[in-house]
Image: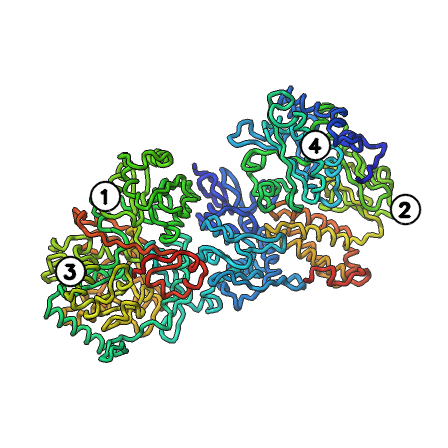
Amino acid sequence: MADVSFTVDGKKLTAPAGTLLIDACRAHGIEIPAFCYYPGLSLQAACRMCVVRQEKVPKLQTACTTPVAEGLVFTTESPEIAQARKATIELLLGNHPLDCPVCDAGGECELQDMTFRYGAHESKYVEIKQHREEQQWSPVVFFDRPRCILCYRCVRMCGEGMDVWALGIQNRGAGAVIAPNKQDHLECEECGQCIDVCPVGALTSGTYRYKTRPWEMNHVSTVCAHCGDGCKTTLGLKRADDGMEIVRGDNRDKSGINGDFLCIKGRYAFDYSNREDRLTKPLVRQANGELAPVSWEEALEFAGKKLREIRDAKGGRAIGVIGSNRTTNEEAYLLQKFARSVLGTNNIDHHRTADYATFAAALKGNADREASLRDFAAAPAILLLGGDPTEEHPGLAWQLRSDVRLNQARLYVVNHELIKLRRQAKAFLEISQDGYADLVSFLSGNGGALSSNEKAASFREDLLKEESVLIVFGPEYRGKDIEALVKFGMGFPKAKFAILGDYANSRGAADMGLFPDLLPGYVPVTAAGTFAEEYGEALPAAPGLDLVEMFDAAGAGDLAALYVVGSNPVSRYGVDASALKNVFLVVQDMFLTETAKLADVVFPAANLYEKAGTVTNTFGDIQLVKKAADRAGVRSDFELIVRLADRMGADVKKLVPFGRGGVRADFGQTRGAQSGEADRHQVWLTAHHIELKASPFDPFAIFDEVQRLVPAYDIPRMDLLTGNDQHIKTELVQIENTGSRRDLVLPSKDTLFTSGTLGKYSAMLHSVMESHTRKTAETAAD
Amino acid sequence: MPSLVSHPDEVKILSRRFGQGAADIEKYLEMDGYKAVQAAIEKGPDWIIAEMKASGLRGRGGAGFPTGMKWSFVPKQSAKPKYVLVNGDESEPGTCKDHLIFLHDPHAVIEGTMIAGLAIGSKLGFIYLRGEYRYLLKIVEKAVADAYAKGFLGKNIFGTGVDFDIVTQTGAGAYEVGEESALMESLEGKRGVPRIKPPFPAVVGLYGGPTVINNAETIATAPHILLMGGEAYAKVGSERNGGTRLFGISGHVERPGVYELPMGYNLKRAIYEVGGGIRGGKKLKAVVPGGSSTPVLLPEEIDIGLDFDQLGKAGSMLGSGGIVVLDETVSIVEFALRTISFYQHESCGWCIPCREGTDWLKKSIGRIYAGGGMEKDIDNIRYLAENMMGRTFCPLGDAAAMPTLGFVKKFRQEFEDYVNGKARSETPLLQISGAH
């Protein structure tokens, strides 16, 4: 729409014609207060707080429903308007319990803020306030009716935003009340979005309520540890006896790629971090066969010595390494460097959840064709093949729904199940579970079984009319099917692609070379040139054993040691735990997992919320994770790898190139984060690569190297450090042909209420009834 | 069936079939029934709208918007179907005129609906009856069925090739759905809460289609206008207020009832002549001229013509034509409490000023009435009502605030008497006030 100019409080402003006055004003820094207005949700005009004076109009107008037009003149603040707003607040406070001193929202409450701004200090009534008992709607959602101001944000967020429609309004007039879908409780996706948008303390979180006051927390914005979407989550930290405890996850910071959204996992499933049964002391298996806590000195010395002996006696081929989907890029990179240059083995792998390698190869030469999660916010058309984003990628599902709702995007969905997103689809095509390859063939015009299917024909016809399409596909596509799909997609004038993998850094694990045959950036181990040069070691030239082969080798007595970092391979489908009987097993983990129980040495590891670094979501968006929580006794996987290398007698300076000038920068790991203040000088130095990395445990020391050796990761650091997501920028892949690679992809098919092995340790995820009524994940993975 | 009243001053246009058995289609046909719609089919939409404009008919629901103009706003071309919607959600206390129309002359509503449909190019009309008028549904449904049986409704009506259907629906018992957009929500099966305007119903109405929505009396008047001619109809009334209107005179008069009087008829005469004067020879205390939401008039203010403009000038409203006469025995405080109790009960709760405002007004007035009032309560009531005026999402808030303001301004002394213990109710505090 063309711009129009209009006047607000004597200032000439311009905005596209039809823009709502409240939005136009906000864009120009004029804030008009509102309770019911919420960007992206339908208009209500119910709270009457945004009233303004429009010239030549007799009544005050609501800014949330008034579109701007040429020449209009508005007043947004005047005694008359202030009085109107004050009167509205007085009415709200009439029945409000004013229990601010104990209310979760106290200090973060829009009603408090508005009362402060417009003043409604006098209580005009003597009647008893309307009281209703607080209700628990689910383990994570509580409702306190007297605090509710009936802005209907929750109702709309649940319905329009989440497509769940679990909240409604009962009764009328002064008796009107927000009500859950099942009389006295909720059955929903338990996302807590209703709590997030609640301007007051009416909806509160079961995991957070009455734990602290907002101002007693530190707030650290980091990336969710669960699925592969990489949503930004703001953690609220409170001091505990043994460190900093996470008491809240929310979405205060709407700047993330998830926009307004967080799912149940991002919002609540941090509770594993605070568990009592977390490992906080190193464990070493004793002569009696029991694991017993020992000192760090003893455990490191024991593991280092033993690994060195095995390497020296049997060579690197006798050692295997399994990395994680949930460690940082720096840790994954360091782990493979450690494996190849210190242990001398290519026997390194991780639990693969999507075929990133083939995807990267298929896009070779077209790296700009990979879609960022941000691209989904405004894409005109999207083709979703396989997967079930509502369950497995709730952040993506949110973006898809929002794009359809707000931009009238055309969503084409193909699936073998009636996935929920079909409700937003312009066209939905149900195919058989093994029909995904045939589908691409059909879409490409090669006929096949679908040719006689009328629905498929019209689906194809509509789809091919699109010019610009985002093609996003689930783990149903691997190997040559991905190649065929990308080839088909390239037929559109403008197409971008996205592959769906499971966990917070599944993509990073692949990009950082946790493969027996591929180095970071998908460089074949057979062409290790620059890496060998940089590492200053002769790297093993032949591809090593993959995850399944390592267990086979262990069973056959050919594997003497296995180093498992943040992974639980024993729980993976088809893996025989008894194969590890005679293997020296070192495990780094938060808990005594199925794998850790078998270990000879277990190191208590920090989780993703307890360290700094970067992670890459499944769309190739790189983000900074910041150290938020802290638990006495645990160490980051990064530190543990370095210490182990040190005990093995490796040159730590070679492994982590620290101490090369400048002062220390550790992503704010040791200060800044805890004090809540950003160290701007540090940020500047780090952004310009001129800081001193004085510590061998400094992830940025290794990030320099990643940026040098994996060109795709050479992104602007300043943007990263200031909390923005950066999409992989250049061609990632250096391999040509992936057809001969073995398909080890095993998606875990998590639901909204599972999260691999990590999810097992979240009591909250188990506590919601939906986690019992829905199907469980198929394989546990990391 | 309530007995009908009559007075020589009446000009019976709309009510001429009342009491004649015209709910029966044969009787209706004898009394010029379905002639107007056939003329309308023959002469076309432009003629209909021209006659309606000439008639000076203004909406009988209460707002008084010129009907012909409303019909002319509907776009000629529309991708979505157009609808006619009859608002029979008559709920304003003091008003019981539509009730009589449905009871005595349901075919007039059907015929009027068809005429409106022809005027705007719609093929489907809805007659929406107030939930509490469920017992009238039988009568209306029979009339509709009879019209179908005669071929007046359905495909090819009167053999003219024109199609028109009518659907009936009752509400679930909410005053609020008398507001046109809330009525549409209700008809669509949703909560009866008003919509944001614009867009207005003429552009985006029922099911998103252009919609004409009119009060049942307005619709039932349309056939008469076409029969007698717009200009002739206009001449019956006063300036810019064409025709007649059904006035419900209730309260302390000798002969309460619904009378069809010309627009502009003198209010004082309506009470003392038509209504037979104050019951039992008592003194007049106050008059609510147009349904409970209109500000009260004092005895010295009632020498005034009953039309939209004259009452507007006097600081009140013609509203829905429900004249409530209060004699000297009435406690204004109690009457104010009854009035606000109604609006408190009927507020849909959508917006803050109405939802909370009506509740606090009821509580405060209730407390004063029960003897627990304080001096500042009276000013608080004024403050509250003034801050509701013009601030609410729909006119219900105004409808609650306006009369309250009128009572407090014109009868402040009575409120003070209650506060000072000079007057008090027999009912204990807990049973009256909102102290729950």
Q: In terms of depth relative to the viewer, which is nearer, A561 or B194?
A: A561
Q: Are the numbered discs 1 and 3 placed on the same chain, yes or no?
A: yes
Give the chain letter at badge 1.
Answer: A
**Disc ID at residue B281:** 2
Question: Which residue bears the numbered disc 4?
Answer: B143
Callout 1: few (<14), some (14-19), or many (20+) C-alpha neighbours within 10 Å?
many
Report the Cα–Cα distance between label 1 and label 3: 26 Å
Residue A782 quadrant: bottom left
Residue A184 quadrant: bottom right
Query: Horizontal and vertical percent for residue A141?
Result: 49, 61
Earlier sequence position, callout 1 versus callout 3: 3
Q: Quadrant of the N terminus of chain A?
A: top left
Report the Cα–Cα distance between label 3 and label 2: 111 Å
Report the Cα–Cα distance between label 4 and label 3: 89 Å
Q: In terms of depth relative to the viewer, which is nearer, A90 or B217?
A: B217
Residue A596 quadrant: bottom left
Q: SS at mark 4?
A: helix
Query: Horizontal and vertical percent for residue A346?
Result: 15, 60
Query: Horizontal and vertical percent for residue B100?
Result: 75, 37
Q: SS at mark 3?
A: loop
Question: Which residue bears the numbered disc 3?
Answer: A346
What kind of residue is marked 1? Answer: Glu
Give the chain letter at badge 2.
Answer: B
Name which residue lies at 10% across and 57% down: A541
Q: Are the numbered discs 3 and 2 placed on the same chain, yes or no?
A: no
**Disc ID at residue A483:** 1
Name which residue lies at 23% across and 43% down: A483
Nearer the observer: mark 1 or 2; the answer is: 1
Name which residue lies at 70% across and 32% down: B143
What kind of residue is marked 2? Answer: Gly
Disc 4, disc 3: CB below 8 Å? no
